[in-house]
């Protein structure tokens, strides 16, 4: 037996072990809350790639705390982050190409609209000139 208990004077090893396990559980819960918050924050700042990297890193730390190989877990986390970053880069490139294609289509549409406007103005001016010429001819005959 070790330690001193308020009621009997001694704390048994089972009580001491329970106390240690309770502290470990509280520490683990605090770690999980902190890492979940960090994962959410990474997701907001870095998008899916940041969230995936933080998730992998959290797993690596948790495994290392449980006695696992931290180097391989960190390498796995880095590989996951790189893969997510590559996916995001490819998606961004695809979106950029689509935006450029759409912008070019709008540009062609604008050119067509301008051509129609110019044609309409030209036809209107010709019709107006013809009308004025006819009107002047009639006024000359009257005069």
Image (cartoon, helix red, strand yellow):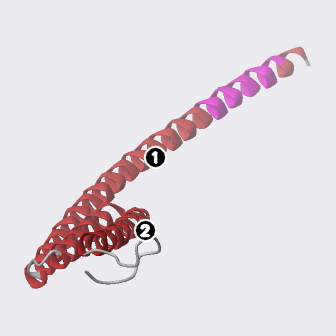
Residue in the image at 43% along x and 46% along y: 106
Name the spot of residue 4 as percent of width and height, x first: 39, 81
Q: Earlier in the sequence, mark 2 or mark 1?
A: 2
46 or 13: nearer the eye? 13
In the figure, residue 3 lies in which quadrant?
Answer: bottom left
Q: Which residue is mark 2?
A: 45
Q: Is residue 129 magenta?
A: yes
Name above or below for residue 92 compared with residue 5: above
Crowding near the residue tagged with mark 2, few <14, some 14–19, many ≥20 C-alpha atoms within 10 Å: few
Name the spot of residue 60 as percent of width and height, x first: 18, 74
Image-based side of 114 in relation to 130, left or right = left
Name above or below for residue 97 compared with residue 74: above
111 or 57: nearer the eye? 57
Name above or below for residue 127 compared with residue 59: above
Name the spot of residue 79 as percent of width and height, x first: 13, 74
Query: Quadrant location of the N terminus?
Result: bottom left
Q: Which residue is mark 1?
A: 111
Crowding near the residue tagged with mark 1, few <14, some 14–19, many ≥20 C-alpha atoms within 10 Å: few
Residue in the image at 58% along x and 31% along y: 123
Image-based side of 65 in relation to 71, left or right = right
Name above or below for residue 109 compared with residue 87: above
Q: Is residue 134 magenta?
A: yes
In the figure, residue 22 lies in which quadrant?
Answer: bottom left
17 or 107: nearer the eye? 17
- Please state the extent of the stretch shown in magenta in the rendering: 123-138
Q: Classify mark 2: helix, strand or loop.
A: helix
Name the spot of residue 59 as percent of width and height, x first: 20, 69
Image-based side of 9 in relation to 18, left or right = right
């Amino acid at each position: 037996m070790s330690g001193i208990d308020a009621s009997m004077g001694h704390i048994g090893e089972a009580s001491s072990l329970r106390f240690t396990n309770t502290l470990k559980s509280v520490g683990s819960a605090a770690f999980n809350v902190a890492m979940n918050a960090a994962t959410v924050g990474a997701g907001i700042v870095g998008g899916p790639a940041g969230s995936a990297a933080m998730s992998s890193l959290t797993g690596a730390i948790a495994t290392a705390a449980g006695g696992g190989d931290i180097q391989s877990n960190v390498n796995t986390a880095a590989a996951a982050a790189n893969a997510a970053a590559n996916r995001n880069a490819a998606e961004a490139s695809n979106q950029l190409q689509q935006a450029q294609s759409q912008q070019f289509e709008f540009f062609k549409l604008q050119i067509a609209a301008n051509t129609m406007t110019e044609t309409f103005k030209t036809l209107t001016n010709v019709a107006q000139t013809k009308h004025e010429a006819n009107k002047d001819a009639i006024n000359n005959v009257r005069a």
